[in-house]
Amino acid sequence: MRVFVTGATGAIGGHAVPALVRAGHEVTALARSGQKAAVLADQGAHPVSVSLFDARALATAFSGMDAVVNLASAMPSTLRFPLYRAWQETERVRTEGSAAVAEAARTAGVGRLVQESVAMLYRPGGSTWIREDWPLDEYPQTRGNLAAEASARRFTAAGGIGTVLRLGLFYGPGAAHAEQLYALARKRIGVRFGPPGNYLSLIHLADAARAVVAALTAPAGPFNVVDDEPLTQRAQLAALATAAGRTPLLRGPGRAGLLLGSRLTSLTRSLRVSNAAFRAETGWAPRYPSARAGWLATAAVLEQRIRQD
């Protein structure tokens, strides 16, 4: 297929573009600088420069494409994550940018749109398995994702196939926050948000990239893309500590994270999300069924980098 990718040099895009190329697809990707264009070219993609917010220019770029994969984002840094103002650019990308992408894809006659979203949209479910029909929640950090999903639904209503991937909290080499958590774990500092028994649904970046490829054959609608086995906050921290080979001497913020309310609710709420529907529709399965395996694989890559430095 001829596939156009936005957000191609981001955390997920950096894995998804090579995965699409390996799968035999002809990939064109948005590049915002010459340096990023060179990276994409080295990965086997054809880089183009166009504004994410210019629907007319995007429609020209999308001409002749079979599918558009919208992975564009602008996530705040780990330190700025709890600040509402830090999410303004992210919200603009996911609201205005996603609307422009969907409109341009319709105008260009593209048949398929794959839109990134997040599993943290769901209302807390305790230990209940959460599937795609579980009620969604609305808090400040979800507004952009809800708008992006609405754009995908409009694309479907206009006759296209709009597939939404509700990704778990991603981790792995290339995810800045995950690399920071691993660095802290090596210093015997264990970071855990929320009560220890709450579930956290994750997805390794490599598995998210493979899900993007699989989504090119999925029907319209939302699909959860998470590990097979979501771990509790306690078990996730233990998996990270095992991968780092260090027992934490300091742990936090734990339940204190609840004090920040909606600022950290995407990390503190209990979400035991199921990937059963996406597996059944596409045959996709995560290479790393839980964070236990995923953190070990991540540690192997990061430790090699440390030795090289």
Image (cartoon, helix red, strand yellow):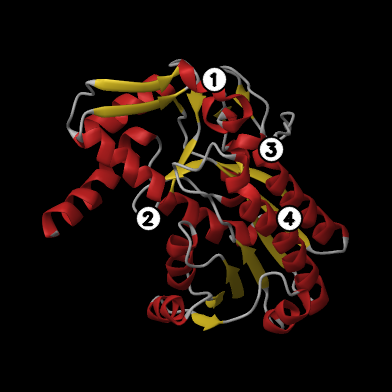
Q: Which residue is mark 2?
A: 174
Q: Residue 125 location, x and y as percent? A: 63, 21
Which mark is first along the chain, 3 or 4?
Answer: 4
Q: Tell me the element at label 2.
A: loop
Badge 1, how many Cα within 10 Å: few under 14, some, many 20+? some
Q: Residue at 19%, 56% (x, y): give it.
A: 305
Q: Nearer the viewer, mark 1 or mark 2?
A: 1
Which mark is first along the chain, 2 or 1?
Answer: 2
Q: Residue at 61%, 73% (x, y): give it.
A: 4
Q: Nearer the viewer, mark 4 or mark 2?
A: 4
Task: Please determine whether, in this image, residue 236 is positioned above or below residue 78.
Answer: above
Work out whether residue 108 can be spotted: yes
Q: CA distance from mark 4 to mark 3?
A: 13 Å
Which mark is first along the chain, 4 or 1?
Answer: 4
Q: Residue 236 location, x and y as percent? A: 37, 27
Specify the amino acid type for callout 4: Thr
The outermost residue toward the right is 158
Q: Quadrant of residue 261?
A: top right
Check contact, mark 4 vs mark 3: CB within 8 A.
no
Q: Nearer the viewer, mark 4 or mark 3?
A: 3
Image quadrant occupied by the N terminus: bottom right
State left or right for residue 30 relative to residue 183.
right
Which mark is first along the chain, 3 or 1?
Answer: 3
Q: CA distance from mark 3 to mark 2?
A: 26 Å
Q: Which residue is mark 3?
A: 140
Specify the amino acid type for callout 1: Leu
Specify the amino acid type for callout 2: Gly
Image quadrant occupied by the C terminus: bottom left
